[in-house]
Amino acid sequence: MVAEVGGDARCGIGTRLQSARERKGLTILQAAERLHVDAGILESLEAENFSALGAPVFVRGHLRHYAELIGEPPVELQQLYSNTSTTVQPDLTRIPRAAPPDLRRLFLPAIAVLLGFALAGTVWWVRSLSDVKLPSLEQAVPLAVRAAAEDNTALAPLATGAGVKPGAGNPASGPAQPQAQQSAAASAPAPPPPATAHGRQTALTLKFSADSWVEVYDASGQRLFYDVGAADSARTLQGTPPLSVVLGNAPGVVIEVNGRRAAITTMVQPDGSAHFLINAYGRAVRAKQADGG
């Protein structure tokens, strides 16, 4: 039912939002604090002043969040908005663009900076060479080689026919081999720590062929992205799975997980939105499913 209020057509969205909020016992400020948005956004939604919120993709995103908070069905409210909205789409081609910088003016300062870094690196290298001290001959000879030399000196009577039996009457020959083994063990590199499978990050790439509202949260609930993706652009995010993804215009977004395209066609709602999870295996599943499969 559409009612005339102050000369503007009202479609009942504002009334439903206000009634549901009051049933929840929330004020505008309390609801805005829970949604982490400005209170003026919620006031515009309840007043059905959608033009104050900008493009329709912004309106749909705020409307869905507000409806979920106060217990109203988001799909029904967004359908009402689609049936009554007459907002003109912004002409993105008329957005003023900044003139490209004059690279010729930046060339000489960049060369000067590079030469300064090269000179500083050369001075540091020369000074570091002057501070290097060569080790003494005794320090340069490995412990194992010195132990072997001592062992050969102790066993010299065997070569002259003195009749000394190995291991008997020659106490110097005993510790030589364990000492060399200890030196070899000390010089061996420590084994690398075992790799852990915890904390693995998932790379999520969003490629936009049309404007779309996007929200992405990681497993801890941290917000990774909360904005409108512009057409003909792409955005790559890193996070711990499962990743929660909300799209306002899912047909206009291509999802890639760790470089592989993910199929989300079956999760698109009639109004074009989609809410799904990227689980630890890089698969897109409905938000109500468990993330283990």
Image: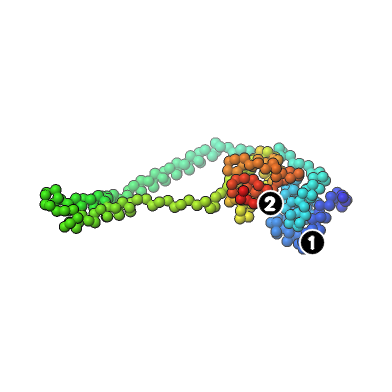
| Residue 272 location, quadrant | top right
Q: Could you tell me which residue is drawn at 70 percent across and 56 percent down?
A: 35
Badge 1 density bin: few <14, some 14–19, many ≥20, Cα 10 Å: few
Q: Position of residue 118 (x, y in %)?
A: 43, 42
Q: Is residue 263 visible?
A: yes
Q: Using the image, tell me which numbered label, if any, was put on residue 23.
A: 1
Mark 2 residue element: loop
Q: Which residue is mark 2?
A: 288
**How does the figure colour the protein chain or chains?**
rainbow
The amino acid type of the residue labelled 1 equals Arg
The amino acid type of the residue labelled 2 equals Lys
Q: Residue farthest to the top?
A: 104
Name the front one of labels 2 and 1.
Answer: 2
Q: How many marks?
A: 2
Q: Could you tell me which residue is drawn at 65 percent across and 49 percent down?
A: 277
Q: Nearer the viewer, residue 240 or 163?
A: 163
Q: Could you tell me which residue is drawn at 11 percent across and 49 percent down?
A: 161
The first of marks 2 and 1 along the sequence is 1
